[in-house]
Amino acid sequence: MKLSVVIVSYNVRHYLVQCLESVARAIEGIDGDVWVVDNNSPDDSVAAVRSLFPDVHVIVNNVNVGFSRANNQAISQATGDFILLLNPDTIVGRQAFTDALALMEREPQAGALGVKMLNRDGSFAKESRRGLPTPLTAFYKMSGLCALFPRSRRFGKYYMQYLDPRQATKIEVISGAFMLLRRKMLDQVGLLDEDYFMYGEDIDLSYRLLKGGWQNWYLPYDIIHYKGESTQKSSFRYVHVFYQAMLIFFNKHYGHLSIFFSLPVKIAIYSRAIVAFVQMMTKRFHHFLYPRS
C-alpha cells in the first residue's frame, strides 16, 4: 500500500467530518487507506465516522491517551509506505496527496514533508515552516526578538519567514497538522515520542529525522488549517501541556548544556507560561465582570 492517512480526533465531530470528506476526494486513485483514532470523545464522532465513512479504520480509546500515543497506535497497524499524520481541523485539496507523494518520490532523502497551511481567513500560517528550537533560537522566540525581526536569519529562524513561501525547499521542523512520513525513515529513527502528550512531538521527530541523515521538506501546496479548533487553548491544561512539552524537548536534546546556556532558556519558558496564565485569568475575570462585552 502506498499511503496510510492517520487522523487523531477528540470531540470535534463537525471538523472531522469535513476533514474526512476532503481526504476521500484527495485519496482517489491512490492505493491507500484512512485511520481515525478517537481519544474517548464525549460527542458522537465515532458513530458519525462509522456511518458516513464505512471504509475508514476506526480505533476507539476508552481514555484520552494523547496525540503521540494515539498516532503510534494507527501507525503500528497501518501498512502504507508513507504515513500522513493529519489534524481533524484541516481541509486538504484534491491534489494534496498526489503532489506531496510526487515530491517524496523525487527526493529519496526526504524523510518527511509539510505543506503551506492557511488560516481560516486565508492568511499564511507561520507554523508551516519552522526552525529547530535550539537554545538560541528558542531564546529569541521567547524573548520577543523573533517577533521584532521576523525576516532575520538569526532572530527569526523559528518561523523561517526569510524563505519564499511559494518555493519548495528543505526546512527543519514540520507541523504535525500535516506531516507526511516515509515508513523507511520511521523504521530507522522510531515513532513519535510518547513522553509528549500533545505539542512538541512533531518538533522532536523532525529533529531525530535530521539527526538520522534524512531531510524535511516544505511543499507550497495550500491546505486549510483551522489552527487549534481540535484543542481547547483557553484552558489551564493547555498552558501546562504546551509549555511542559517545550521543557521535555529542551531537557531531552539540550540537557547536557551548561547552566549558563540552559538557564536563560528555562527562565524564558517559565516566564512565558506565567504570562499566558495571567492573561488567561485576566480574560476570565473580565468576562465575569462584563459578560456581554
Image: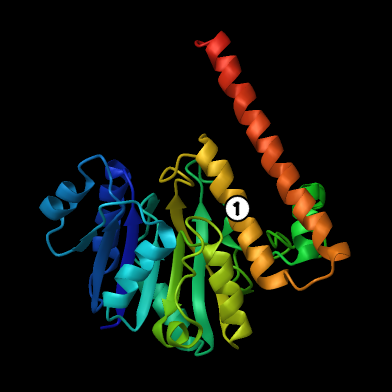
Q: Residue at x 40, y 46 (%)?
A: 230
Q: Residue at x 43, y 72 (%)?
A: 180
Amino acid type, label 1: Gln
Q: Residue at x 12, y 60 (%)?
A: 54
For the residue pair 12 and 91, the one nearer the viewer reads as 12
Q: Position of residue 6 (x, y in %)?
A: 33, 66
Q: Position of residue 190 (x, y in %)?
A: 47, 80
Q: Is residue 108 above or below residue 246?
A: below
Q: Is residue 197 visible?
A: yes
Secondary structure beneath label 1: helix
Q: Position of residue 184 (x, y in %)?
A: 42, 88
For the residue pair 108 and 142, the one nearer the viewer reads as 142
Placement of the N terminus among the 4 image quadrants: bottom left
For the residue pair 128 and 54, the one nearer the viewer reads as 54
Which of the 4 image quadrants contains residue 157?
bottom right
With 196 as the anchor, is 169 left or right in this view?
Answer: right
Q: Position of residue 245 (x, y in %)?
A: 58, 56
What residue does disc 1 label? Answer: 244
Q: Residue at x 79, y 50 (%)?
A: 267
Placement of the C terminus among the 4 image quadrants: top right
